[in-house]
Amino acid sequence: MDPVSLQLGTSHLWSWLVRLLSKDPEWLNAKVKFFLPKMDLSSEDKAQDAAQGVILQLGRLHTQGRATWQAFIHCVCMELDVPLDLEVPLLSTWGHGDGFPSQLETGEESQPVSQLHHGLKRPYQSCGSSPRLKQCKKQQLELARKYLQLLKTSAQQRYAGGSPGPGQPLAFHQAYIPPILQWSRTTAPIHTQEGATLAEDGTDVSIRDLFNTRADKGPRVTVLLGKAGMGKTTLAHRLCQRWADGQLDRFQALFLFEFRQLNLVTCLLTLPQLLFDLYVSPEAGSDSVFRYLEDNADGVLLIFDGLDQALHPHCSREKEGPEDPSPALALFSGLCRGTLLPGCWVLATSRPGKLPDCLPVEAATVHMWGFDRPRMEEYVGRVFSDPLRQEAALAELRESRHLRSMCAVPALCWVTCLCLHRLLPGSSPGQAAALLPTVTQNYVQMVATLGPRGCLPPKSLLDLSEVALRGLETGKVLFSVGDIHPSTMASGAALGLLTSFCICTGPGHQDTGYAFTHLSLQEFFAALYLMASPKVDKTALVGHVTLNSHWVLRTKARPGLLDHLPTFLAGLASCACRPFLSLVAQRDETWVSAKQAAVMQALRKLAARRLTGPKVVALCHCVGETQEPELASLVAQSLPYHLSFHNFPLTYTDLAALTNILGHRNAPIHLDFEGCPLEPHCPEALAGCKQVENLSFKSRKCGDAFAEALSRSLPTMGNLKKLGLSGSKITARGIGHLVPALRLCPQLEEVSFQDNQLKDWAVLNIVEVLPCLPRLQKLDLSRNNVSMSTLLCLTKVAVACPTVRTLQVREADLIFLLSPPAETAAELQGAPDLLGNAGQRRRRAELQDRSLTLRLQQCHLRVHDVQELIAQLQEGPHLDVVDLSGNQLDDEGCRLMAEATSQLRIARKLDLSDNGLSVDGVHCVLSAASTCQTLEELHISLLHKTVVFTFAPEPEQQKGIRRRAALWVSLTHLMPSEPLLHATRIRLTHCGLQAKHLEPLCRALRGSCRLGHLDFSGNALGDEGVAQLARLLPGLGALQSLDLSENGLSLDAVLMLAPCFATLQWLLHLDISSESQHVILRGDRRGRDLAGGSLPQFPAGAQFFAFGQRRVPRTFCLSQCQLEPLSLTRLCETLEKCPGPLEVKGRGQ
């Protein structure tokens, strides 16, 4: 008989237990693996027969201590078919504290054996206590080679029997699907393979790309951010497994640590102790192995999982080397900053939040997202190996929107598959999904699914729930064997709710730790305790119904562990959970209903508050879990019209919860997402949401996958009027998905794609949809990469598209303004055309009468571009304003545009300012513009870089003016030969004109028969120029005014201008002020006054024939002119020769 049975004194019971377990060795192996996670069952202590093997394994379990043995006995009674006559003595003898000896007399100590990581027994050696051994290079390399092989063998053994993870709680196949990874921020350059592009903010990244960051000096640090349940821990173990399989061959050594375990280490450690004592210890030569790791640090990868769970702050003083003992977080800081093991690679996982200061600024940040639809289906397909069951599960997933929402979170997807595995057999299509409407009910079904023989132990569940709540309140997610009662641990193990692994609490100290399979599962059980325990009153319960704001993530270094607790409380408040709560609480449903009502009332109070975006999302999750339409309607109606979400991560599940609530809203809403890291496929959650009127996304995290997902939802949002997608990383591929979707959205009134770095093809692809959007009023394509050739293509589109009213381009701005036809709204609503073809005729008339405003400012247009532009505009509609200011047209380009004015039918203005026009080019522009019949004013100022053409009103306005002019003719008996056209105003101010420029200018001006106002002010004509101008003025025809102010004139100029009264018939007033450099020649202005300001002014010569050929008095006014007596005499002699009557005025002489 074996020593254990002799010591226990229960030979009969022991023999029966050995026979029972010999029938199911796989179950026994699983339990030994659970209670002894580091035990290697495959390589050592192989028994000669099955019974001997069972005895050896029972002995191992027994040596772990009383609590482990009692928990194992409870598992035997709960999970195996044990006859009642044997179950009672088993529990009475070994299931309680009696009869368990303090120490076995078998030569084995009762304390845990100091074992190596993953069950490898090696001689223990602490590298911190042994002196450095002087070994040759060859010996060092041999020791390092053996250690690296030991590391790899250890990892291979760890992952040989199951999927990656801290432990496999169930004999249920877990498939692994690569996650969605997305760069969030990186300042270090990226080393990419040939043909690859640089990884930028928002770019998708593969697992291998995580380690492509090139840093010649300093650390290579990457932080992987993801919400709970996204699979961060699974990915960390997956990387370790892939390295063990030789797939990450760039690394010679890989170390994986979890902060939830490092938190248990209270003593200070050196880096060698962290690597060797808490992970895998070398067989010999620890110092030599560590020196090798230092010399080859670029081939060392250290993974730290759960940075957000780190408890102990690192020391403030900087560590100088690996010999300084420090807390675990301080060692992590030294590795990140490069003071320890410089050149190594560090990967840390964390929930979103304020990252520790120990991270360097050059650390790369990667967001980890959940499953998109293809990944969901692939995961479900791998979980269900049976084809029939696989097809049934996929059918449930495709038909159920709420099921897809849950499966977007990998951890929940596993729970859902577990429930479907039990519910699908014998259920009709859709029935299984109907039993899993919420996350909470998913967990309820999972607990029921895992119950042995279909029964649930209420007391054990409540005890396990108490452990869960106590752990969350104290920040504890790892439990020792003494923290959990043996029967409770047995229940958790039997239901697959707990997982076990070896933990190191310090050098040479190892123990077995237990944890819930996932943090959300611990939160579920904590909520279950609050709802089902009689010890928790309503006041304490309501105190946990809160909304955690995501804004604390900016300042809170360690996020709390109770984030999802209010959601589970709301889910348990659902009527569907009442029977389950009644069973666990062992109370009637009336007692349960009272607690549920307290939670519902707390949610109603929260719904009445004014909440920020993060709290709105949290409330939507809670209300969705309750399945109460009345509460959902209350929340939906209380949301503001403009709902903003700024700078916090949002997932598909978050938007699905929001969409679910909006479905109960009666009024439209505007959703604005700015600066939020968004899950690439999250827009799919908005499909079918009719309440969204304005939808705006502004985030560099949005890429082509985001655009593709959005394209699937847009056609289903029938009331969407404004769509904004700006500041993203969308390329032509993403636009290729969006454009077909936009064609299916005729109700859109405004679309913005600004600041997306779109290139030519994508921009042209977008503008092709303009004819398909009859109600569109604005299309914003600003701050994209548009070439000159594409810009000219856009002008062609603006000319050809009948609804475009304005194309505005200024540096980076590019905006289309459109005016839909008046009857468009009626047509979209299906209103009949009561006038038959009259509506079509009216539309044709609108298109013919439409005017286009074209503003191409600071676009680097050159002469050849203007030639093409003129050809386009000649075939287009009437032009209201053409603004080409700030380009590079030079003299030739300005001349070409001036010549084209007579053909382009510009109604208001042509602006050629700031285009490099020179003094020599001014007369060319004047000659070209002289042929334009509608030119009203030309203003050129080279000093201010102004070149502006102003044109007369449209022909319809001219008709009214002509009628008033005809009335004036009848009153004044104007000669029929005088034209009734407006007078043109030419302003050549501050152009640096000199006397030598006047002759070509006047020659150019002679071509205009309607020249009325001429302004030469602010130039440098001087007396010489005035004398030359006095000679040239008669050839310019009858003017209404001439301004020669600020031209550096002397008093001699007065004598030169006085004879103009005799030579210029139109001149009626001459005003000269020497001090203010004011020199103006004017004709009569009565015509303009009688026309009410709208009548074109008549040539001054016409005044002499009006009212019976009477002469009109003239005025000569001198101000501030100090004339010498001789000059005054000469002036009087000159004025005497002028036809009278002449009035001479003098002021300040």
Image (cartoon, rainbow, N blue to C red):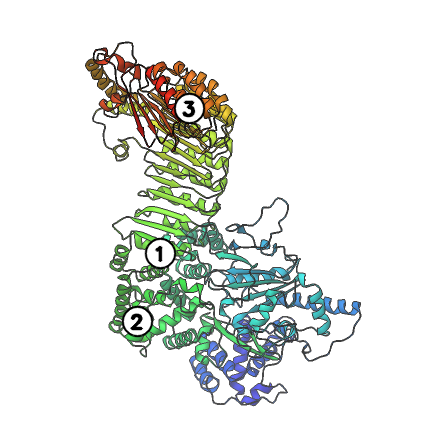
> Disc 2 or 1, which lies upstream in sequence?
2
Discs 3, 1 touching: Cβ within 8 Å: no
For the residue pair 259 and 172, the one nearer the viewer reads as: 259
Residue 1079 image offset from top left, x and y in percent: 37, 27
Residue 173 in view, yes or no = no
Residue beneath label 1, please?
657
Q: Going 54% across and 88% down the picture, which residue do you hit?
A: 8
Q: Residue at x 26, y 15 (%)?
A: 1103
Dividing the picture into quadrants, the one containing residue 113 is bottom right
Q: Earlier in the sequence, mark 2 or mark 3?
A: 2
Q: Residue 861 at what x, y percent from top left?
A: 50, 30
Mark 3 → mark 1, Cα distance in angstroms: 85 Å
* Foreground: disc 2 or disc 3: 3
Dot 3 or dot 1: first in sequence order is: 1
Q: Amino acid at mark 3?
A: Ala
Q: Quadrant of residue 542?
A: bottom left
Question: Would you name the residue on which mark 2 appears?
Answer: 542
Circle 1 crowding by C-alpha within 10 Å: few under 14, some 14–19, many from 20: many
Residue 459 appears in view: yes
302 left or right of 866? right
| Total number of numbered discs in the rendering | 3
Looking at the rendered image, the quarter that the C terminus falls into is: top left
Say above or below: 254 vs 768: below
Q: Could you tell me how far apart the alpha carbons at marks 2 and 3 are, in whole angstroms?
A: 96 Å
Q: Amino acid at mark 1?
A: Ala
Residue for badge 3: 1053
Residue 913 or residue 266, whichever sits in front: 913
